[in-house]
Amino acid sequence: MDPVSLFAELNRRRVFRAIVGYGIAAFAVLQIIEPVMHGLHWPEAVLSYVVVALALGFPLMVALAWVFDVKAGRIERTAPAAGGTSMLIHNRALLALVLAGVGVLAAAPGVVYFFFLRSGARATAVSQSVAVGATPALPAMASIAVLPFVDMSAQKDQEYFSDGVAEEILNALSQVDGLRVIGRSSSFSFKGRNEDLRGIGEKLGVAHLLEGSVRKSGSRIRVTAQLIETSGGSHLWSKVYDSKLTDIFAVQDEIARGVVAALKVKLLPPARAAHRTASLEAHDLYLKGRYFWNKRTGEALRRSAEFFEDSIRHDRSYALAYCGLADALAMRIEYDNARPSEMLPKAKEAALRALELEPGLAEAHAALGNIANYQNGWTAALAEHRKALDLNPNYAMAQKWIGNILMITGHLQEARVAFERAVQMDPASLIARTNVGETYFFERDFQTAIEQFRLTLEMDPEFEQARLSLARAYSWQGKHAEALAETDRLHITPITNRQLLRANVLARAGRREEALALARGLEARSGREHLDAGAFAAVWLALGDNDKALTLLGKACADHEPMDVVEILPEMDPVRADPRFHEVLRCANLE
């Protein structure tokens, strides 16, 4: 049968009509299954399986359309063409091959779009949405960023205090209904930079900026504040406050109320004042604790915890100080390699005490969520972070932590949406931008991940989490020299974490003896120092020692170590079919 005759016969048997109808039905199924899948929290792979199943249905549908037809509401076998039969029709094997080919050709456009064009287009769109300098797309409402107040004290030694004043005003404004307040990390990223206010407004996507200064001298303070409209640079409101240090809370409240009045949004809720302390010493120590907590290094977190403890000693009813202590202790696990068994009980006790003192405190719920995360309690962690976000819709860090839980539990596309939302709330958040890249890394889309990590490093070349993630992605792309070069640029990251990364890269590069020497050295230190179990297991897997890796993971989970990204690590692929790996996942509440 020549091509023209074959086309005519396919048309006579209404095969093309069947292809169009099946294509429309398949498209409708996909439109229904995707929201249902996300609503029921099914794995992202389910959608891919559905697409493959629908694609396999095309050849079957073509065969059925060739053999049967529908007439008068009844299914009948299609009669042969008038004028004789062809060799093709008599040769059943050849006929089946031709019909299968027609089905594959019909399915090919949809498969190519879903698995190649669609993912590439989405990756480009997301990269553009979180690109450096991109204006966040958020619903129109009154919006403001509180810039760090300038320390005007004679000795320039009150930076922690001026930062704290600005941050507490930011926190007060974040409670205002109908006001979008940009997160601290974005607002404070302009500290010490002499940038045009209009440019800052465009980068942060806000219509207003609050800037000011603090001069502290003995028991007296002078606080200046001015509210600026970013589009034209006009001053909407400004005031200078000269008062006693004991009046600092009243000054902060008056500034916040002045901003609220100028922007014509709802008044501040009165409950926020309950989070304060009557002790100036406790408040000063709390501000020092938050100042060092925001530095996120091992040494800074240790100092932060000490300041929070001192603050609590001055005021046993200061809820925010307990929250700060819980945050500092929990973060030491990640940034200081502190042992979870030593940090988490104290952190949980502090967070629960904060909730006893202030049941509606968003920071306390977020702290409990973070602690549950380190205890592999994903359901509880997600509930606490969502509660924190309900209490404070401008709480960008709670939004980011929601993304963390979704990512850890394998809901990578939902996690990416959560991280993108966190970036919109806090556009200069380096960690949220890095997390966006990590979702691509865990999906094995290493090129898109690399592009996102590079964008983050353009904003701050010293942000080491993005550089560490970039090194891993390079290694998985086979660019081991680039991965080692990025590893060598890490200086703040704890040395054991750097050595774990280097050993992994060396093993993947085929430099087994060097990697093995590092791994044995780390093994000898593991009795004295806490090591990330997932990262250490990944090293042994890269070295081909699956048994040692699985034994390490099993012991770590039995000892209640954090197992946050074990399920989604690409390094775990060699043992995914091993029953021992699934025992680890069940132990970690990941299966």
Image (cartoon, grey):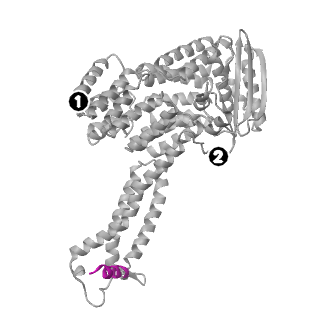
Q: Residues within 10 Å of mark 1 (few under 14, many from 20)?
A: some
Where is residue 279 drawn, in percent x and y?
A: 67, 13
Q: Amino acid at mark 1?
A: Arg
Q: Nearer the viewer, residue 357 or 113?
A: 113
Where is residue 572 drawn, in percent x and y?
A: 31, 38
Where's the C terminus, which quadrant? top left
Q: What's the CA distance linking mark 1 and mark 2?
A: 53 Å
The first of marks 1 and 2 along the sequence is 2
Residue at image location 35% in from the left, 65% down from the top:
57
Q: Nearer the viewer, residue 55 or 314?
A: 55
Task: Confirm whether residue 463 shows in the render.
Answer: yes
Label 2 belongs to which residue? 139
Q: Quadrant of residue 25?
A: bottom left
Query: Does the magenta run of residues contain 4?
Result: yes
Q: Which residues are magenta?
A: 1-11
Magenta region, main secondary structure:
helix
Where is residue 384 drawn, in percent x and y?
A: 53, 34
Residue at image location 45% in from the left, 68% down from the top:
24
Where's the N terminus, which quadrant? bottom left
Residue at image location 34% in from the left, 72% down from the top:
62
Seen in the picture, residue 313 relative to 404 is either above or below; the reply is above
Q: Nearer the viewer, residue 365 or 529?
A: 529
Task: Confirm whether residue 409 shows in the render.
Answer: no
Query: Does the magenta run of residues contain 516?
Result: no
Q: Quadrant of residue 509?
A: top left
Q: How many marks?
A: 2
Seen in the picture, residue 378 relative to 90 is either above or below; the reply is above
Seen in the picture, residue 74 relative to 524 is either above or below; the reply is below
Q: Amino acid at mark 2?
A: Pro
Label 1: element kind: helix
Label 1 belongs to which residue? 512
